[in-house]
Image: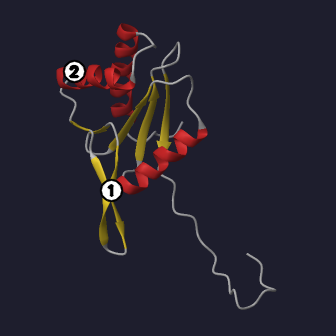
Amino acid sequence: MSDLLYRDEIYQIVTLCMEVHRELGHDQDAVIYQDALELEFRRFKLPYVRDPKHGVEYKGALLPHHYQSDFILFDKILFVGKACERLTEPQIKRVQDFLAIARLPLALLVNFGEESLAWKRVIRAEPSKIESVDFRNPSQSA
């Protein structure tokens, strides 16, 4: 079995998420779970930043709007908590976008809204190679 990226840190975080889910159940708003998690992170002395803002650059300029995630833990793991019926592919894609903006390699997407806690490790996707197309030559295909 290969080593998972940040395996021990993820184990700590998921363990605390399970505790919060066990105590609060699955029918709270996402912000309630975030509040409870923050208490657990403090109690177990996990290094975290809550509601970090991730700036977006465009042609060397920082745009006025930004993305905001729930937490960054250990200065290297993006945490996104949900309270919904189930995790979806668009949510996972959005977390991958957050990872690219935050320039972090790994995110933990957790759903407190299901009967049993659901979570997914999301690895930052490498930028795809874009092939150049000569639009002056219509016979060339993409």
Q: Residue at x 46, y 13 (%)?
A: 26
Number of numbered markers: 2
Dot 1 amino acid type = His
Q: Are dots 2 and 1 in contact, CB under 8 Å?
A: no
Q: Secondary structure at mark 1?
A: strand
Query: Which numbered dot is residue 39?
Result: 2
Q: Quadrant of residue 25?
A: top left
**In this rendering, position of residue 54 left or right of residue 47:** right
Percent position of residue 131, x then y: 64, 76
Amino acid marked by disc 2: Leu
Q: What is the secondary structure assignment of the residue under circle 2? A: helix
Task: Count residues near mark 2 (Cα–Cα under 10 Å), then give few for <14, some for 14-19, many for 20+.
Answer: few
Comes first in the chain, label 2 or label 1:
2
The quarter of the image holding the N terminus is top right
The residue under the point 27% across, 23% down is: 35
The one of 21 and 113 positioned closer to us in this rendering? 113
Q: Where residue 123 appears, x then y in whole percent?
A: 48, 46
Front: mark 2 or 1: 1
* x and y percentages locating residue 67 in the rendered image: 36, 50
Q: Which residue is mark 1?
A: 65
Classify residue 49 as left or right of residue 98: left
What residue lies at 40% left-to-right and 14% top-to-bottom? 21
Dividing the picture into quarters, in which one does residue 20 lie? Answer: top left
Q: Is residue 36 above or below residue 126?
A: above
Q: Residue 129: x, y in percent?
A: 58, 69
Tell me the CA gap for discs 2 and 1.
Answer: 29 Å
Q: Residue at x 60, y 72 (%)?
A: 130
The relative height of residue 111 versus residue 97 in the rendered view (above or below) is: above
Name the one closer to the observer, 21 or 30. Answer: 30
Q: Residues within 10 Å of mark 1 (few under 14, many from 20)?
A: few
